Amino acid sequence: MPPKDERNDFEWLSDRIKYLEPEEDIISCDKTCYHVGMWSPLKTVLLSYYYAIFTDIASKHTDNMIYIDLLAGSGIVNINGTDSKIIGSPLVAVYFARHPFSKMFLAESNESSREALEKRLQIVMQKQDLDYQNIVGKIYPNAFTATQAAIKYMNDKVRNHNGVLNLCLVDYEGFNEVPFDLIKKISKFHGDTIINFQTHQIARILTNKNSDLLTSFLGTDEWKHISSDNYRDTLQLYQNQLKKEDRPIFEAVEINSETAYYYHLIFACRATAKGSQWMKAIRRIKPKIESSNARTVKEIYNIIKGNQSQLTDF
Ligand SMILES: C[S@@+](CC[C@H](N)C(=O)[O-])C[C@H]1O[C@@H](n2cnc3c(N)ncnc32)[C@H](O)[C@@H]1O
């Protein structure tokens, strides 16, 4: 039996957030950073947790795990109004994978972010003795071309009877960056899908029944039957959509700001003979994440930076 974790939820979260702090050389190699709200580390903690468990378990079934990140960012995010920084999703995939991904298909449309991400990945991958050229090669300028490349790679492997498992993240800020159609194409292959679903923001868009935006994002126009008062029903609709694409196992974790704004990080995967072993892990940590919000993260940073005593100091 693993040793019992004696930390309370706050201590657990503090430790996980500390692990996300970037090393000085990847901060200083480029000034481009993506800016995020104080709640964002809650999402990145979840990703780091999931990537570790996914790669641990998946590596027992295949030696070919690939990572697809369609909205990859610049490798580092800066928390608005502070000088605190955490690593972005592609770096999480390098640092937290228990066994390295054999290929990473990354897309970032902003040129300076793309260049910054490339520099940062080269630094961290070199330190880990991973071959950047072979694993990443290039960062694609849009989600569409990255998806095409990933699909070509997976098709070639399937043709050669070489099993591939993919982990695909779509870290939306809105609804127009990646159509559901691309997610559908990737879901034809074995793997898991993680979606940043902007639950609170969707209420505003639901009022315009003539918009094509949500039809493209959700892959159906059934949203037209949902009123903006019942905007959370779109989450159920999205779950149904993923289910049709062979992602029947679903969990959505709420990420809360300090205000009315919140979103869900959705984890969706295929059913396997043993069920989803890594989804159990997400269900275990879901209450710790959902009982926290931007204020909890702020308190953690205050303690890390020495501005506030820990509760345990009293
Ligand atoms: C929410 S951020 C991603 C943050 C990143 N996942 C992280 O953890 O640091 C979304 C990113 O997607 C990029 N983007 C927007 N539309 C895109 C598209 N169609 N293809 C590729 N990148 C896009 C934006 O420039 C932005 O950097």
Image: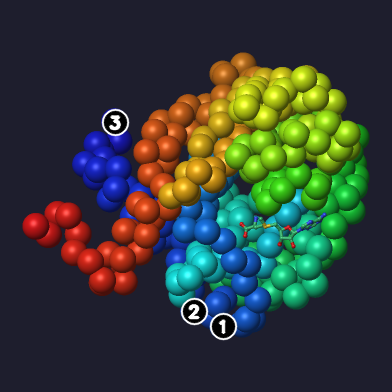
Disc 2 residue type? Glu
**Ligand 1 image-quadrant field:** bottom right
For the residue pair 304 and 124, the one nearer the viewer reads as 304
> Is there any visible trace of residue 38 in the rendered image?
yes
> Is there any visible trace of residue 162 in the rendered image?
no
Res. 264 image quadrant = top right
C-beta proximity under 8 Å, tags 2 and 1:
yes
Figure quadrant of the N terminus: top left
Q: Is residue 99 left or right of residue 257?
A: right
Res. 243 image quadrant = top right
Check disc 2 and report its element: helix, strand or loop: helix
Residue occupied by mark 3: 1
Q: Name the residue located 65 percent from the left edge and 76 percent from the top edge.
A: 32
User: Which percent across, then down, holds residue 222?
Assistant: 81, 22
Image: 88 above or below 277 = below
Residue depth check, mark 3 versus mark 2: number of the one nearer the observer:
2
User: Which percent across, then down, holds residue 194?
Assistant: 65, 39
Which circle marks residue 28 in the picture? 1
For the residue pair 3 and 225, the one nearer the viewer reads as 225
State which tag comes first along the sequence, 1 or 3. Answer: 3
Q: Is residue 294 left or right of residue 207?
A: left
Residue occupied by mark 2: 24
Which circle marks residue 272 in the picture? none
